[in-house]
Amino acid sequence: MKIVALAGGVGGAKLAHGLAQILPPEDLTIIVNTGDDFEHLGLYISPDLDTVCYTLAGLANPETGWGRVGETWNTISNIEKLGGPNWFRLGDQDIATHLERTRRMKEGQSLSQITKDFCTAWEIKQTILPMSDSPVRTMVDTDEGELAFQEYFVHRHCEPRVKNFRFEGIEAAQPTSGALDALLSADAVIICPSNPWVSVDPILKIFPEIKKPMIAISPIIGGKTVKGPAAKMYAELGIEPSALAVEKHYRGLLSGFVLDTIDEELSKQMSVKTLVTNTLMNDYTDRARLAQDVLNFIRSL
Amino acid sequence: MKIVALAGGVGGAKLAHGLAQILPPEDLTIIVNTGDDFEHLGLYISPDLDTVCYTLAGLANPETGWGRVGETWNTISNIEKLGGPNWFRLGDQDIATHLERTRRMKEGQSLSQITKDFCTAWEIKQTILPMSDSPVRTMVDTDEGELAFQEYFVHRHCEPRVKNFRFEGIEAAQPTSGALDALLSADAVIICPSNPWVSVDPILKIFPEIKKPMIAISPIIGGKTVKGPAAKMYAELGIEPSALAVEKHYRGLLSGFVLDTIDEELSKQMSVKTLVTNTLMNDYTDRARLAQDVLNFIRSL
């Protein structure tokens, strides 16, 4: 079964890693959100792409879910001493990724080509693709005005109240060609448990006509998110945060929906077939188990 | 006695540090060569300026003379894994300097303003000035063609034979205003034991009319350099490398010349007053002792 997974950062990376433990490498393609990408300290930073790559390479910090394991912080602490911006915590190993990516982009290489080369260097056998090689920038409209995503997310700790989202450059952005090919040959598309508003929506806007069975896993469990501001965003947009709200968000697109056992009651109100299972991924075993559950569910549809 | 020191990298930084141990901070200005500056991995790197700053701040690696003490190499080793350029060994702490400097330059700040702020952050009380805020690039004409300085010096380990030097941008380069002021109020100018061809000549070309007593310390001891390619350059240019060759290099400019006891015989052939002393600087005490000898010599002229 050939699978394309659509992923944002930590939650998406965890399920992608679970799928990678089960599927043959050539049968798994992960299309990653690049709306969170930004330039900082002159570096081109692609947080979701890096989180997915580090996770699949076994290089991710298991405590945080983002960044590198065994990371050191000598550069950022010295930037701090010089009075430079320190709100985006860049580790020394992580900076290598950004410096080398920025250098190659300045040479004219595409983000997808660079990602391919990096995956080879990190011995990742699955295919990881940015959703687009064109710049897309998620802008968060808040009660304090419009903020670039990382400004909202990291610098302001998601404190401003969300009113809307805008994906700058999305109309002009071309899907990466490898991603289109992967979608054509896929048996099913899995929307990972990532933030629907800021991680998945940009990818869906880049690929508006996916003519494959699509299933989504709720990133909201018991009204809360494991990580990130999805639940807070739902509440601020006047929608009660729940697995049901997520299912409604994707309504019309899905063949199936996966929610946590804690939310079983909500499945009755859903308009697609559901799988109720334990969706919390605390360790590597959880990731593989959830991935297996999802794959079995797809087969059953 | 107000002193202006003209310095390149390691040797210049050592004597500047010696002078800093003796003179009141407000009486010492160090004008530093920027002909070695270059862009690498998108970073603006100013090797001589950093060596002088790190040395005066007590942050320099005492073993190498360049780079930071207690340095780690996690970024460059990861760049290497990604197949990126690794010939210029950038430490993690050192990268902070380059990232923050590059960020500020892109904001439009001048190299001298940035250097001033960095010196404040590093608690350096003496004045350290780049020779110019305009870009000057030392180009080395060799038997393998013209090479940018760091390409010749670091990447090619000074292996190509030197034929000539060119300082790109030197005609248009303006001296930093602080440097002109310092030279106006100086009692004497000390040419540190730096490479005459590539460290001192660019500074002298930027400040062609220094109307103050000038003394130079030979970077060549017993026909050899402590560090760097000065002796090799003299030989390849058809001049026997010696303290005498250095004195001749500066002839017409100097009021006095300082050479090592090992070269005492050569002093007879020199056209200015000489000080023969131990010029080797192995430790902090050596630096202060040589600085004191040089200051006494200046007073005696």
Image: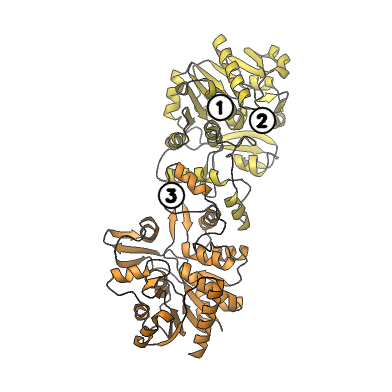
Chain colours: A orange, B yellow
Residue drawn at x 54%, y 57% is A97
Q: Which residue is mark 3?
A: A86
| Disc 3 secondary structure class | loop
Q: CA distance from mark 3 to mark 1?
A: 31 Å
Q: Quarter of the image for the C terminus of chain B: give it.
A: top right
**Same chain? Circles 3 and 1:** no
* Image x and y of residue A41, in percent: 45, 50
Sooner in the amino-acid sequence: mark 2 or mark 1 = 1
* Image x and y of residue A267, in percent: 38, 85
Residue drawn at x 38%, y 75% is A222
> Of tags 2 and 1, which is closer to the observer?
1
Residue closest to the eye, B118 or A209? B118
Q: Which residue is mark 1?
A: B17
Q: CA distance from mark 2 to mark 1?
A: 21 Å
Q: CA distance from mark 3 to mark 2?
A: 41 Å
- Neighbours of disc 1 within 10 Å: few (<14), some (14-19), many (20+): many
Q: Which residue is mark 2?
A: B230
Chain identity of mark 2: B
Residue closest to the eye, B298 or A75? A75
Callout 3 touching callout 2 (CB < 8 Å): no
* Image x and y of residue B93, in percent: 54, 44
Tally of marks: 3
**What is the three-letter code of the residue carrying label 2?**
Ala
Residue B170 in the image: above or below residue B181: below
- Neighbours of disc 2 within 10 Å: few (<14), some (14-19), many (20+): many
| Disc 2 secondary structure class | helix
Residue closest to the eye, A221 or B167? A221
